[in-house]
Amino acid sequence: MIYLLSVISFSGLTVALAAMLMIAERLLINYGICKLDINAGEKPLELEGGETLLAALYANEIFIPSACGGKGTCGHCKVTVTSGGGPVLPTETPHLSRKEIRSNVRLACQVKIREDIYVLIPEDYLNVRMFTSTVQSSVDLTYDIKEIRLHLDEPAEISHRPGQYVQVQAPAPGGAEFRAYSISSPVYESNLVQLVVRLIPGGIGSTYLHNVQPGDTVNFTGPYGEFRLNEDPSVEIVCVGGGCGMAPMRNIIYTLYERWPDRVCWLFFGCRTTRDIFYLEELNKLAKKHPNLHVIYALSDELGEDEKWDGETGFIHLSVDKYLESGVRRQAFLCGPPLMIEAVTRVLKEKGTDDIFYDEF
């Protein structure tokens, strides 16, 4: 009992001391005006020192990815700090590789601006905007997935590459937080953004989006993402996803066939049961219009007594292995859980495909 009380007392003193130090830093330390130099003078800023680099960037409408509200848990807000960032903190090291640390990559949410600071940010991030939109519709696709269409108000149009995503601003107890969702609408529908959102119990972003109604306002930043579609029409496209991983695949497929009506594309989509199937009828209609589109759904769970299914069964990487021939020039886009990504990547590489983009969730 005495030991337990000692531990509780020590923990309480540690927390209290940390809080006092944070308060003292805010009240007693004046860092003055610091220079924030972005990309070697491309976007120089002057600001009051003391806040985090992430907060300073957002305050100046430079929106880099961040999904945890600056808590240092998501690891998305990586930038290169060439000078003025101080030492790498223990809160950063779990999210940084040794190569990244040697290359001065940091988490913007953990870097405090205490002096002039010099950072390098990918050019794409400098083009990211904050968008205001109005919910046009919210439709149930399955028992836990909704399709949400957002009509853009300001700016009125978005320019994005197929497979990119946005970060929706969702209300949270500690202040608004951002959550990432892939754009499922094709690039030629520039005045709207469509999302496919699975409800995660207790999830800040998904709970918010599953409760929005037509007419509600939704703010988001974007576009983000590294997906880049090969412009050579002779290169086959392979899309593999599961669940809400359908979103970037739908974007890629519709964008692809608007531009190259005869291009070869394979869609492999994994579901657990028939309850998880959506967009199949819609995509089969598109495949009838474009015969080089091959749509293959597979169910991984055993069929129930009342389930009727004449398609593929088993994990989706087995279907990829079954249908794709070796030695064909292909580019692949994958979106789903890590184990799926790993299994499909292994199959694709065995088939001779190395041009692979993926998003894990």
Image (cartoon, grey):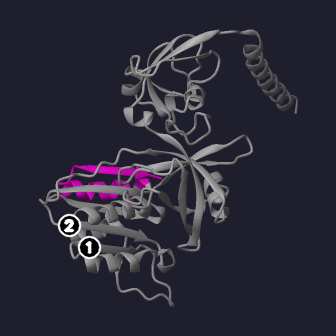
Q: Residues within 10 Å of mark 2 (few under 14, many from 20)?
A: many
The alpha-carbon separation of the residues under discs 2 and 1 comes to 8 Å
Q: Is residue 341 magenta?
A: yes
Q: Position of residue 51 (x, y in %)?
A: 64, 21
In the image, residue 186 sits, relative to residue 168, either above or below, namely below
Q: Residues within 10 Å of mark 1 (few under 14, many from 20)?
A: some
Identity of the residue furthest to the left in this view: 327
In the image, residue 294 sits, relative to residue 160, either above or below, namely below
Q: Residue at x 42, y 53 (%)?
A: 338
Label 2 belongs to which residue? Answer: 264
Q: Quick check: 61 left or right of 287? A: right
Q: Residue at x 23, y 49 (%)?
A: 355
Assign a secondary structure to mark 1. Answer: strand
Q: What amino acid type is highlighted by mark number 1?
A: His
Q: Residue at x 36, y 44 (%)?
A: 226
Foreground pick, 148 / 90? 148
Q: Is residue 36 magenta?
A: no
Quadrant in which the N terminus appears: top right
In the image, residue 133 sits, relative to residue 270, either above or below, namely above
Where, by quadrant of the figure, is residue 296 drawn? bottom left
Magenta span covers which residues?
338-361
Foreground pick, 125 / 29? 125
Tag 2 and tag 1, C-beta contact below 8 Å = yes
Q: What amino acid type is highlighted by mark number 2?
A: Val
Q: Residue at x 50, y 34 (%)?
A: 77
Label 1 belongs to which residue? Answer: 294
Q: Quick check: 260 left or right of 298? A: left
Assign a secondary structure to mark 2. Answer: loop
Mark before the other along the chain sequence, 2 or 1? 2
